[in-house]
Image (tube, rainbow, N blue to C red):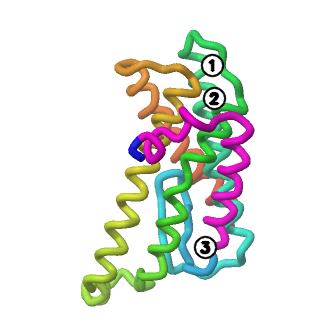
Amino acid sequence: MKKWLFTPFQFVAGSKALLIGVAVMAATAIMGYYSETHFDGVLDTHTGAVTPIGYYFIEQLVNWACLTLLFFTAGKLFSRSSIRFVDVAGTMALSRWPGYIAAIAGFGLDVPVTNIPERILQCLTAPMIACLLVTMACTILMVALYYNAWRISCNMKDGKGVGIFIVTLILAEVASKLLLMQVYK
């Protein structure tokens, strides 16, 4: 069970992983629409903003594209192995499955559209804190999946691979934020 949770890429990769991952991202976009949960960055989950459903799909696409392109490039630059684009694209898409759970948790979040600390503190109920913890756990799991996807798809080893992963993930976050800012304008 643990292997399926953290390294499903040992069992499914390539076009099969891509198909499953795209289906999961589409389901996440739909669930995000209904729970008003946005994935406005490869590491970001926010609720409360009501937007047309197309934005939820664009967020999934931009996040996945940034991850795929940057990790594929990093793999080509730093791995001695032969790397297939479809493997990186598929495993990165499949790595986004915890977002679906975060989108479901978004139903329990009633985030105020204010910066007044008193209003924010009033909203911190036990169910909201539980939903926030679930969302944070999903983000942590997604990062672990990103790492395992990249490590397996690009045959990267520990040490150097961890440092390259961290830098590439930060670049993917920045790139997705910048692209999504343009979409939201």
Mark 2 and mark 3 lie on one chain; the one further toward the N terminus is 3
Query: How dense is the environment of label 1, judged by Cα within 10 Å: few (below 14), some, or many (20 and up)?
Result: some
The residues bearing labels 1 and 2 have C-alpha atoms spaced at a distance of 6 Å
According to the picture, the residue beneath numbered tag 1 turns out to be: 76
Please, what is the dominant secondary structure of the magenta stretch?
A: helix
Amino acid marked by disc 1: Lys
Farthest residue to the front: give it: 1
Amino acid marked by disc 3: Met
Tell me whether the residue at label 3 lies in contact with that at label 1, contact meaning CB atoms closer than 8 angstroms.
Answer: no
Q: Quadrant of residue 67?
A: top right
**x, y percentage for residue 131?**
36, 74
Q: In this view, does 100 lie above or below 173?
A: below
Q: Is residue 170 in sight in this rendering?
A: no
- Assess whether residue 56 is covered by the magenta stretch: no
Which residue shows up at 45% across the image and 74% down it?
105
Q: In which quarter of the image is residue 138?
A: bottom left
Farthest residue to the top: give it: 80
Which residue shows up at 59% across the image and 42% down it?
92
According to the picture, the residue beneath numbered tag 3 turns out to be: 31
Horizontal placement of 89 versus 137: left or right? right
**x, y percentage for residue 129?**
29, 76
Residue in the foreground of this view, choosing between 76 and 97:
97
The residues bearing labels 2 and 3 have C-alpha atoms spaced at a distance of 28 Å
Which residue shows up at 64% across the image and 60% down it?
59
The residues bearing labels 3 and 1 have C-alpha atoms spaced at a distance of 35 Å
Q: In this view, does 91 lie above or below 37?
A: above
Of badges 2 and 3, the one in the foreground is 3
Query: How dense is the environment of label 2, judged by Cα within 10 Å: few (below 14), some, or many (20 and up)?
Result: many
Amino acid marked by disc 2: Phe
Magenta stretch, residue numbers: 3-30
Which residue shows up at 56% across the image and 78% down it?
36
**x, y percentage for residue 50?**
61, 82
